[in-house]
Amino acid sequence: MELIANLGVGFATALTPMNLFLCFIGCLVGTLIGVLPGVGPIATIAMLMPLTLKVDPTGALIMLAGIYYGAQYGGSTTAILVNMPGEVTAVVTAIDGHEMAKRGEAGIALGVAALGSFVAGTIATLIIAAIGAPLTRLALLFGPAEYFGLMVLGLGLAIVLARGSVLKAVIMVVLGLLLSTVGTDLETGQERLTLGLGELSDGVDFAVLAMGVFGIAEILRNLENPESRNVAVAKVGRLLPGMAELRKCIGPVLRATGLGAVLGILPGNGAVLGPFASYALEKKLAKDPSRFGKGAIEAVAGPESANNAGAQTSFIPLLTLGIPPNAVMALMVGAMTIHGLIPGPQVMTKHPTLFWGMVASMWIGNLLLLVINLPLIGLWVRLLKVPYRLLFTTILLFCAIGIYSINNNPYDVYFTAFFGLVGYLLIKLGLEPAPMLLGFVLGRLMEEKLRQALALSEGSFMTFVERPVSAVLLAIAAVIMVIAVLPAVSRKREQAFQE
Amino acid sequence: MPQRVLRRDFLGGLLILAVAAVAWWLAQPLPSGGNGGVGPGTLPKALAVILGGLGLILSVDALVAQGPGLGRWTLRGPLLILGGLALFGVAVRPLGLAVAGPLLIIVGAFASREVRWGETLVFGALMTLFCVGLFKFALGLPIPLAPWLMGY
């Protein structure tokens, strides 16, 4: 009954006209930017963060969450219509979704994606509401050693789940950790690795890093490949799927929601895996697996639902433990910090209206997306026909204004350009930057907890093994890392990712 | 030998090794000991050593085994896009968005081979107007507009 009371508080907060309006604007603008080819949710959120600066904290987070869902949905739209997924999670949707679009069924693919996402979002909201409170109580019992263990596990998972070579994933995580040590030391106040630049004394700003590596570098990469965007969609067709199609999708949507929700809770960007897992599962279960890859409706409904469920449950580690499990959640940490909130278990106890308001707004956001997007698809299609030479200059200008406005500091723009170059070099040298972001995100918190734990134990590293919870977490991390580098498993892993 | 050296992963490893070396060198003045045995310098140094080691493994591995080459690189995109951003940063405070905006769009547009002068000028002006309306007036962000002309 606690659940219903809490959700009641949440809906009372989220349904005030102001918050409803912010949620609506967030979803709308998020979709608008997310639709642009090559702009994923991370770049969208970093770009649009200034929109929320003048709003109260609850409204700002509601709006940012709306931007996030909107960006994801916009990304799927682009994936289906032009086969240009803005981020990894939309890659799977692009396969069968674009085939459906070529057959003239773009509308149904988009409709099913929206409906599936809505169902998944509804269930995921309930999951967050149900396990948020107990997890928060658990988190309050965690000491620094346990936190450290949990974050090591998160990084271990991120390495195992990253695509490509394990060595490169480890390199990128360590690089991210190293980057996170730049700035003033928390304990002694000494400047570390700042090259004497006063602008770096607060460390590298996460929004700047993310925008450079994901926004600017992506433009550079797209410019190298001559434009092959193909909005070959003559007609979008009807949007609402018929009864037969709906019946085909119910099973996949529900299975995918479960998969995505569980993976999304993992600290270490498990949400990325949801769509792939759902695709593989549905292909295994299908009577005729050969339809997959040729426009199977289940292959759009499933992965899209898994994606949305994971996107939502990945708020759980952030809101209950204060640990951002992926880059998007790290941007949320940045936004919360701007508004003077420290993510962690105390958010729910000290700011219940903010916490539950945000949870409730997730469901409202999903409903709004359904309402906004289905009628607006024509507009998105037209937007996608704009040539890239106009789109990328627009993206560039928005990036520059957005980054400048976060701190009103031109140095942030220079650093963004620098990290754009870094991201471009990394991509060209085959080093996937995503794990670096996670290492960076968790780095500062990990060092803090490590040093706290060692101060408590008077310098004995045994504290991590003697405390049962941290020992178990570290053991799991060690086991998955060992398994990942075993030759037999790593070969299987490669196969799994190729599927 | 040249083909081996120009392999993607060999150079990737070298880049990582170089970053690690710089970080290690910068971390030298930081004390390693402290409260509980971990000081401000401990983690940067330890991470730099680990990173360098891993970079070395990647490089050596690429020399010994087969691997992809470097692929095609271009200078035009990075130069103009990053240069455009730098110009925006330089111009935004003294000259304001009214100048920095079109400047970024015009310089950036030349990163694409399909650039057209007339279109870029018109588009740059329209986009800047739109951004001024959105960020300056609708959202009230304190980004300078044209200090040399209007004082804000």
Image (cartoon, coloured by chain):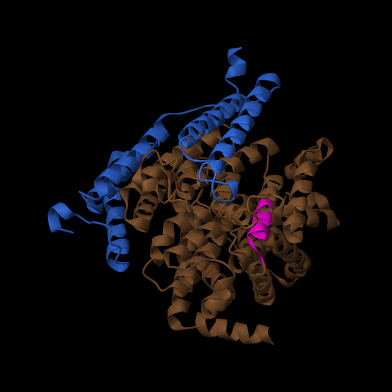
Q: Which of A226 and A195 is in front in this view?
A: A195
Q: Residue at x 69, y 75 (%)?
A: A134
Image chain in blue = B
How far across and down, in percent of the image, does residue A113 sit? 64, 63
- Which quadrant: the N terminus of chain B? top right
**Residue B122 showing in the rendered view:** no
As drawn, A119 above or below A395:
below
As drawn, A193 above or below A303:
above
How far across and down, in percent of the image, does residue A403 sit? 38, 53
How far across and down, in percent of the image, does residue A203 sit? 44, 49
Which segment did they paint magenta?
A142-152
Which quadrant of the figure has residue A349? bottom right
Please identify the residue farthest to the top as the structure is shown: B1
Q: Nearer the viewer, residue A50 or A201?
A: A201
As drawn, B49 above or below A179:
above
Q: Residue at x 43, y 47 (%)?
A: A190
Please identify the residue farthest to the front as the structure is shown: A458
Identify the hue of chain A.
brown
